[in-house]
Image (spheres, rainbow, N blue to C red):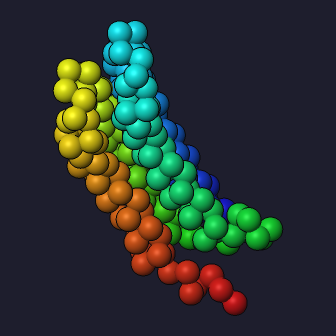
Amino acid sequence: MELGLAIAFIGVAISVFLAGTGSSIGIGAAGRAAAGVLTEKPERYVTNLILVALPSTQGIYGLVGAFFIMFNLGAFAGEMVMISWYDGIIILAAGVAMGFSGLFSGIHQGRVCAAGIQMAAKRPEMSIKAGVMYAVMVELYALFGLVIQIVMVLKGVNWAAYTG
């Protein structure tokens, strides 16, 4: 039973690590673009800040998914649920799904936001219409990863077998 719990916690770590990595790379790409624009147009700070912050949500989704798993495992209740290795692998797969969707969407959302920042420097009226809207389209795939993670944990694991 302890093996299942160890496997599940690897899934928790993957969810946070990969999604957080995607966010940090994405924020870095958007931040570099914003720094370049702000040297010449400091009045664009607020719009740029929104576009720089958008890739941070992937890391948040990875963290939310990890807390959801830990809550279901009883990590905050004082007594952990000892799950089977099979259920541990399901939770690992859920963490991988969220982690990789967060990793890749965070990186690509940062690139889209960087392009939006550069576009808004020349055409400020397009910052929300194009910059934010295109970034939100990439965001959707991180949300899909979180939804799949939650569904896999709720429906894939036989939690009734562990309640007494």
100, 156: nearer the viewer: 100
Residue 8, position as x, y percentages in the image: 55, 58
Residue 61, position as x, y percentages in the image: 47, 53
Residue at screen point 62% across, 82% down: 162
Point out the residue furthest to the top here: 39
Q: Is residue 138 visible?
A: no
Question: How many badges with numbers are in the image?
Answer: 0
Vertical relation: 7 (above or below) 25: below
151 on left or right of 12 = left
Residue 79 figure quarter: bottom right
Residue 85, position as x, y percentages in the image: 53, 65
118, 20: nearer the viewer: 118
Vertical relation: 122 (above or below) 128: above
Residue 111, position as x, y percentages in the image: 28, 29
Q: Is residue 106 visible?
A: yes
Residue at screen point 52% across, 63% down: 88
Residue at screen point 38% across, 29% down: 48
Q: Quadrant of the C terminus?
A: bottom right
17, 32: nearer the viewer: 32
Point out the residue furthest to the right here: 78
